[in-house]
Image (spheres, rainbow, N blue to C red):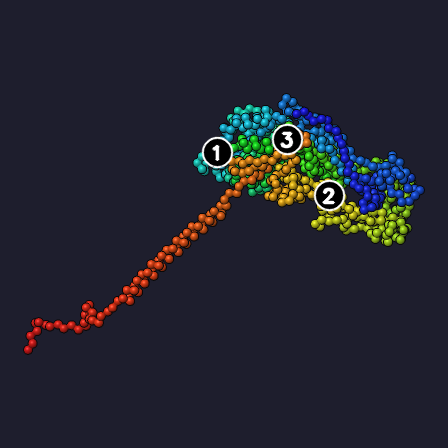
Amino acid sequence: MAASPALITSLFLFISASDVCGSNVCTSRGVTTCKECLAVDPSCAWCSQEELGIKGSGVSRCDLKENLIKEGCNTAALEFPSSSVTIVQDDPLSDKASGTDDVTQVRPQKLHMELRSGMLMLTTPAEDSMRQVEDYPVDLYYLMDLSYSMENDLERLRTLGSELASTMRKTTSNLRMGFGAFVDKTTSPYMYMYSPEVIANPCYPIGTTCQAQFGFKNVLSLTDQVARFTEEVKKQTVSRNRDAPEGGLDAVMQAIVCKEKIGWRPDASHLLVLTTDAKTHTALDARFAGIVQPNDGQCYLDSNNLYNKSAVLDYPSLGLIMDKMTENNINLVFAVTSYVVPLYKEYSQLIPGSTVGLLSDDSGNVIQLIEEAYQKIRSKVVLELVGVPDELNLSFNATCLNGEVIPGLKSCSGLKIGDTVSFSVEAQLRACPQDKTRTFTIKPLGFKDSLEITVDFACGCDCEAKSVPNSPVCSSGNGTFECGVCQCHEGRMGPRCECSMEDYSPSEDNSCVPKGGSSACSGRGDCLCGQCSCHANDFGQVWGKYCECDDFNCLRFKGALCSDHGRCNCGFCQCDAGWTGDSCDCSTRTDTCMSSIGLLCSGRGNCECGVCQCTQPGAYGSTCEKCPTCPDSFFRAKNAMNCSYKDENDCVVNFQYYEDETSKSILFVVKIPECPEGPDILLVLLGVVGAILLLGLVGLLIWKLMVTIHDRREFAKFEEEKAKAKWDTANNPLYVGATSTFTNVAYRGN
């Protein structure tokens, strides 16, 4: 792919309207100095010509440029700084990394800006172009948890070194691999310390042998000799620590910042793979061991490549990890087991440039995991900002693969090797910083290349350098003559400092009453020497020729002045970059409206104030992605072919193919397939249990019915036999009388 043609810088200046509610914004503020005038609005100019307004009254030195020229101001006396941009370095983008020592993925490399307060500056989309070049070098550092539970993972890795290298060489011919290991801090309560045998062999209590505990060890610096990687991994044995979480972040920090020891190349993609099956300690956890010294983000590997501050420094925070990753262009891959995936996904959301992959119990899928993570990293460009002054607001517009400019977006996804994307940058100076010149950087996450921007803040006036202290023009030295006006000493007032406040009493001077007004100085000041001296106010600042302006009477949104997204200036909100509306409550961002298929509001609505307003009947969802009644469940483009197929799970996958205006083929795939709903397990279970209970109940009822019928039959039969029985009057043959007579045969009576 040929390098893009030479870029032509173009600049669009968005000047805010000079008329606000029918009045001239420059003359309505009542400013008295050149610096104040330039801060009112980008359309305002100041005339430092001394003779301006001498012959007539009512001429303001702060006015629109064309008005001042009409009043006779010499163009040489006009103070009207403008914003501009100059390309300082603009090397062409590279097509391929192999065969060259100087690879360029970001163009241009240096810009110089002159920026005036309040002015918006927008560079063209070609201003900042980026390309994922082919065959870019890769440094892959494998950082492994060697606690006892990872024994089977280590055994599996011993056989995967060559296969891992072969897989990665499909994407680059310039690969280097390294290996590091970690356990946890070498102090109690993280380490077994009850006897010398346990310290030397933590596995002694469980009847086996393992190596002594350590914090982090750089086993093998980055090398292109894959055989050495396999050889060093085979030498490793596991260790054993006391508590469940590990010291993974300690190891990550040292692997990032020890550039020379690890061997990170400046012109390479840096891939740091962390494999573990446990949670990790974070900042402040080391206080359990009495360690209170914060991690300073420095390299502490000794001559044996061991981390020698393990028992001295606290664990690093996620914020410090993020800063060091940005500084050293590191892409971090968390390869973790299912038990801790939710935790590391939360970490990944907080650490830009990191991804999470599900590791099998024996690390058998680690090669596929690393390959997918690297492809995911290479398929997306996300801009990050380094060192941007607080007074400067930046917003971005992205031009990705289809050539459409997407406002408010600073990322592009779905890229292939060799694709070029571009961004335009909108800068707005909200207030003038103390330093007149500042430098900041815009760079893609994980890239070495960056765009360095130096900004000169045009906040002052050239005429200030020609000021005359104690000038005779100011009533014999009662003030400093600067930019055509007198800046009076304390106690003096008037256009030429001719009035002493001690000799003047407040009066109803007509010069202090605005046209159509009834009270002097709008009731918020005193008229002294024909000029308004505005009262102090607890709510903010009051200013203006008639004290008509303040910085606290503007529209509010949810109780916040200008929604906290702008500043109040004389009754009107001046919004920060990225916000608009009367109260600055409307965001101009569109990335919040981007659907999973890369379309604004899924092509079914409009993005208004950062929220999708669905226009397609039946569409709903945060990005209008749900639409059961739509003809298609995905975006319908002009002359597009909508297709679908069923996969092995009987799910319907929808996709669309069409060609854009440049005849480039575009393929949109709906990431969420339409799968048939499976049986509801709960309903099935309840149905089975209910059927069993019902059958049992029916059986009991049948049994009860049969028993009842049988008893009734027997009882009826008994009653029938009872009715048929007839008894005759006779002696009971079984009856024995109560009287018995016995004869004594031996008795011989007289």
Q: Which mark is residue 580?
A: 2
- Residue drawn at x 61%, y 42% is 630
Q: Is residue 642 left or right of residue 27?
A: left
Amino acid found under the numbered disc labelled 2: Thr
Q: Tell me, yes or no, if residue 275 can be seen here.
A: yes
Q: Quadrant of residue 356?
A: top right
**Residue lying furthest right in this view?**
55
Mark 1 or 3: in front is: 3
Q: Which mark is residue 665?
A: 3
Q: Which comes sooner in the sequence, label 1 or label 2?
A: 1
Question: Residue 703 lies in what quarter of the image?
Answer: bottom left
Quarter of the figure that contains the C terminus:
bottom left
Q: Nearer the viewer, mark 1 or mark 2?
A: 2
Is residue 261 visible from the viewing direction of this image? no
> First in sequence: mark 1 or mark 3?
1
Q: What kind of element bears circle 3?
A: strand
Return the mark for residue 152: 1
CA distance separating discs 1 and 3: 46 Å
Residue 400 at what x, y percent from top left? Answer: 67, 33
Q: Residue at x 45, y 51 (%)?
A: 690
Quadrant, the N terminus? top right
